[in-house]
Amino acid sequence: MSSFVKFTAILGAHDQGPLCYLLEIDEAKLLLDCGWSESTDPSQLAALEKVARQIDALLLSHADLDHLGAFPYAAKHLGLTCPVFATTPVHDMGQACMHDLIQAKLNQEEFHLFTKDDIDTAFAKTTILRYSQPTVLTGKCQGITVSAFSAGHTIGGTIWKIKKDTEEIVYAVDYNHRKERHLNGTVLLSTDTLIRPTLLITDAFNTLMPDPAPRKQRDAALIESIATVLSEHGNVLIPSDSSTRVLELLYMLDQHWAFHRYTYHLVFLTNQSQNAINLAKSTLEWMGDGIAQAFTARELPFEFKCLKMIHSIDELDNLMGPKVVLASFPGMMTGFSQDLLIEWGSDPRNMIILPDRAQPGTLGRMMFDDWFESAKMADMNVRHHIQLNRDIPITLKKQVPLVGDELDEYMSKKQAEEEHARLMHSHQLGLDDSSDSDMSDTEEVAKPQPMQFDIYVKDVNRSTGFFKQAQAFKMYPVHEHRPRVDDYGELIDLDMYAKLELQHVPDEAANLAPNEPEENEKVVAPVKKVVPSKYVVEDILLSLKCRMQYIDFEGRSDGKSVKNIIAQVAPRKLVHDCILCWKIQCI
């Protein structure tokens, strides 16, 4: 028996923005992805708000903002309480991506849309699936089975197969049929179970884009551009995501740096840089054959030799000389990429290399459009770059330290609050001690102590049995009062232990091995010193005089391949959307 199927585009229709689709199968309502833009504008989610409480299941495809950026906000504010399904890398790296986003927002403004705890709470409800693992849904989704298949593009990236009765629906967006350094291509064509579905839901992101350059030419163009800028004592900014597509770039650049023994700084700058690399190391089984072969050859993939992972602009400023920095986010509307764009964009020696087209309406997309118009006249040469010469008015939000009278007022207020808190704490301790003393006295009166004796004598009236036994019997009872101690019988002086700890710090520091090589150092997120600060908003004119180039590291199938793949999958019905592709759209 056929089912009633209805598809509604909530986000991602007629543009290249974040994805969020509603799929209705009879009474069940499934949400396919839950993306959001870097601007985190709640007005973009007005359509989602109308249906969020009715959703019965959420399927997440990739671990980036385009596919799960609105998930924590929807779970907290829009009533999205349904079961969530994703692969292990999408869950883990998606969570790291959202933590990076919220920290970037907090570095610029007072951000109250959701907190880090809200992110953890939302992702804790996720059901983890492996590839090709059928999962039967419950509730209104009774009878529906979902299965995850590899999409390429990102680690754990998923093509979803949704089946009910005789209806088979395949949801395949942002897939890549090409094999990359760290990922295999999609299984869309190599798995019979995905062929000839009832309905194929896909995108047409690259349908009208020119054919991309071969991989070797693309990589050579990237290295050549970077080498040229560094030799001229310039800096290179590569705005990227924080946990998924950036891994391909990091893996390639670190190998090149190690092979040629470059002394220039190669930097990965995000709030979650170390965490993202640790997650990559823990998900090697989700990666491609190239990583498996490297691991078999006793190499440790993602154990970078030249890459420096840092977490703040201050750390970056301590690195002297030309540098290549991969910073979040690709749209440069927030995060470290925006900070570096403002700092480096006015210097003609510097260069911005876009590995992604970024979302519409962002600074990254604006620069891509400038490059694209120029590249069309150069036959889309992969080595083509432009010299930016424009001023862009932007609203800059940032956190600045307090100075002068504001700092004095803040410190006075903080000192008064600390004094008040100390007095309240002392008062509470006095009440607790009094209560404990009263309770102790009451317990001593109410509960008699066990009888103890200090002299033992022989009882002549008690029979000792056939064999003679030397026995002593209790006499003269006495109550022995002992001081209150811990379980080990000692009273602990906390101050004494604190002093000892401080005394051992210099000794431990002295035992550390001096001048250890940088490549063996374990980089961890530093503990940031809390500095009194405030948030300010100002309108500035961003002057861009640097060079700019787009090199395709998006990891998506090209337009020609998309058409061939759709023809070979041969769905009975097709849904795909692109603002430029009305002539080939078929529903």
Image (tube, rainbow, N blue to C red):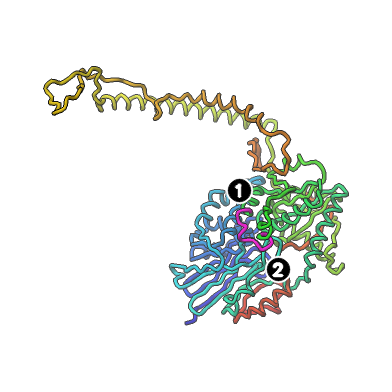
Q: Report the Cα–Cα distance between label 2 and label 1.
A: 39 Å
Regarding mark 1 in the picture, which secondary structure is present there?
loop
Q: Where is residue 355 drawn, in percent x and y?
A: 75, 59
- Residue 288: within the magenta? yes
- Crowd class of label 2 (few under 14; some 14 to 19; many from 20; radius 10 Å): some
Q: Is residue 464 left or right of residue 71?
A: left
For this rendering, which residue is in front, 549 or 184?
184
Q: Are marks 2 and 1 in contact (CB under 8 Å)?
A: no
Regarding mark 2 in the picture, which secondary structure is present there?
loop
Amino acid of disc 1: Phe
Disc 2: which residue: 178
- Residue at image coords 63%, 49%: 275
Q: Above or below — where is 331 with respect to 139?
A: above
Magenta span of residues: 281-291
> Is residue 43 something that shows in the picture?
no
Residue 173, labelled with which disc?
none
> Is residue 221 something that shows in the picture?
yes
Q: Above or below — where is 297 with respect to 489?
A: below
Disc 1: which residue: 111
Chief secondary structure of the magenta portion: helix
For this rendering, which residue is in front, 385 or 229?
229
Farthest residue in the front direction? 467
- Residue 221: within the magenta? no
Indicate the quadrant where residue 366 lies.
Answer: bottom right
Q: Where is residue 174 drawn, in percent x and y?
A: 66, 67
Amino acid of disc 2: Arg
Q: Where is residue 377 drawn, in percent x and y?
A: 87, 68
For the C terminus, the image quarter is bottom right
- Crowd class of label 1 (few under 14; some 14 to 19; many from 20; radius 10 Å): few
- Residue at image coords 75%, 56%: 252
Q: Where is residue 462 drawn, in percent x and y?
A: 13, 24
